Amino acid sequence: MLEALRDFWAIIMAFIGLGVWLVRMEAKMGTNSKDIARLEKQIERERLDTREKLEDLTDMMREQNRDIKILLGRGHIQHWDDRTQPPGRGR
């Protein structure tokens, strides 16, 4: 028995090392799976947050656009260039 153990100790150690390596690999895969699930949830939260912010920004731009159209329609905004001067800034 001892002689067989001496002859095959390298093979036995290789199998033990392989077993340890497989256990570590399984643990790492479990950790990676948890990380992937966590990151997918985080991406989904960020996507929803971005969508909400984009909707808010779109609403603000619509409101500003509407206000600009109203002011332009009333004639309150004029374009001044180098040939014209606003009131109160006489030549």
Image: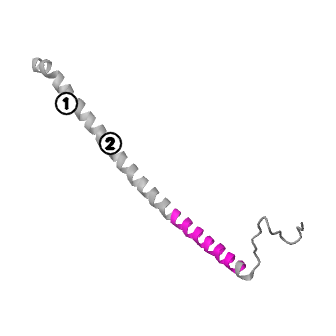
**Rendered location of residue 35, percent (x, y):** 40, 49
Instruction: State the image coordinates of residue 61 (x, y, percent, origin top left).
Output: 62, 71
Q: Based on the displayed image, in which of its 4 quarters is residue 87 positioned?
A: bottom right
| Residue 15, numbered circle | 1
Question: What colouring style does the render use?
Answer: one colour
Q: Pointer 2: residues within 10 angstroms few (<14), some, or many (20+)?
A: few
Three-letter amino acid code at the position of disc 1: Phe
Residue 8 on image: x %, y %: 13, 22
Position of 65 relative to 3 (above/below): below
Magenta region: which residues? 50-71
Q: Residue at x 61, y 74 (%)?
A: 62
Residue 84, image quadrant? bottom right
Q: Nearer the viewer, residue 82 or 86?
A: 82
Placement of the C terminus among the 4 image quadrants: bottom right
Q: Considering only vertical position in the picture, is 70 above or below 15?
A: below
Type of amino acid at the residue the image marks with label 2: Ala
Label 1: how many Cα within 10 Å (few below 14, some 14–19, many 20+): few
Q: Residue at x 33, y 47 (%)?
A: 30
Q: Is residue 21 above or below residue 5?
A: below
Q: Are marks 2 and 1 in contact (CB under 8 Å)?
A: no
Residue 27's mark?
2
Q: Quadrant of residue 58?
A: bottom right
Front position in the image: 69 or 18: 69
